[in-house]
Amino acid sequence: MKGTISACLLEMTDVRYGAAVSQTIVEASGLDEFKLRSPLSEIPDSDFMKLLGATLSTTKKSLEAIADEFGEFWCCTYAPRVYKSVVSTFKNSRDLLLGLDKVHVMMTKAYKNAHPPRFDYQWQSDNLLKVTYKSDRNMIDLYVGLARGVGKYFKERLVVRKVDDSTVTIQFFPA
């Protein structure tokens, strides 16, 4: 996976918990901090899972809580700064969430060894979207947090629910 994910997670812990906590997380993971903070580095999935596990144990937070914090930080702070040209093309939560698969397709063409998750979409009603998460990484909890973060970024009310290990529903509420 691209180091931008681990870099964002560590930047989030710097901001929310302080540099000392981030340092404890890195030490607990046993990984190279420079590589983890380098957005263009290649991070083995197993190393990211070690980092995530160290984050959970150090902060004593649940996976859902950290995924929500990560999603909000990614969507409201990190991505608008690092991926401004991509984020600025979307006008609302619905457009961004539906456009994410196309963004990931572009990433796989632009970045060597990029394997982001893919998504299938099926409307259940006018405001209820079923998303099928397709990835061998089994990081659907991060996707749930990111989808919630998208709603916060656009200041729109969304209800995001994990149905199972490959399915999420997103309910959009009118402004």
Image: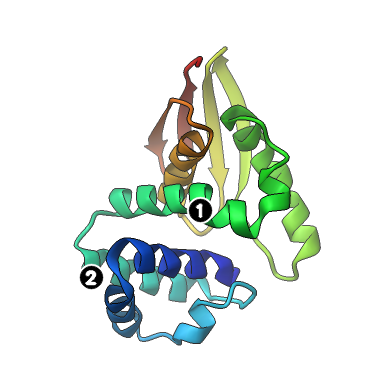
Residue depicted at x 60% and y 36%: 97
From where the camera sits, is residue 104 visible?
Answer: no
User: Above or below — where is 127 with respect to 27?
Assistant: above
- Mark on residue 58? 2
Colour approach in the figure: rainbow
* Front position in the image: 98 or 138: 98
Q: Measured along the vertical axis of the image, is residue 37 above or below residue 55?
A: below
Query: Residue type at mark 1?
Result: Thr
Would you identify the image quadrant in which residue 91 lies?
Answer: top right
Residue 102 visible, this angle: yes
The numbered mark at residue 85 is: none
Residue linked to disc 1: 77
Dots 1, 2 in contact, CB < 8 A: no
Tell me residue 163's x, y (percent).
Answer: 39, 33
Q: What kind of element bears circle 1? A: helix
- For the residue labelled by badge 2, is the local secondary structure a helix, a strand or a loop? helix
- The crowding category of the residue bearing disc 2, from other C-alpha atoms within 10 Å (few below 14, some 14 to 19, many at least 20), is some
Asked if residue 21 lies left or right of residue 129, the reply is: left
Q: Position of residue 29 (x, y in %)?
A: 34, 80
How packed mark 1 is, by other alpha carbons closer than 10 Å (few <14, some 14-19, many 20 or more), is some
Q: CA distance from mark 1 to mark 2?
A: 23 Å
Residue situated furthest left in the rendering: 60
Q: Residue at x 54, y 24 (%)?
A: 129
In the rendered view, would you say 42 is above or below 90? below
Q: Quadrant of residue 89?
A: top right
173 left or right of 86?
left
In this view, 173 is above or below 41: above
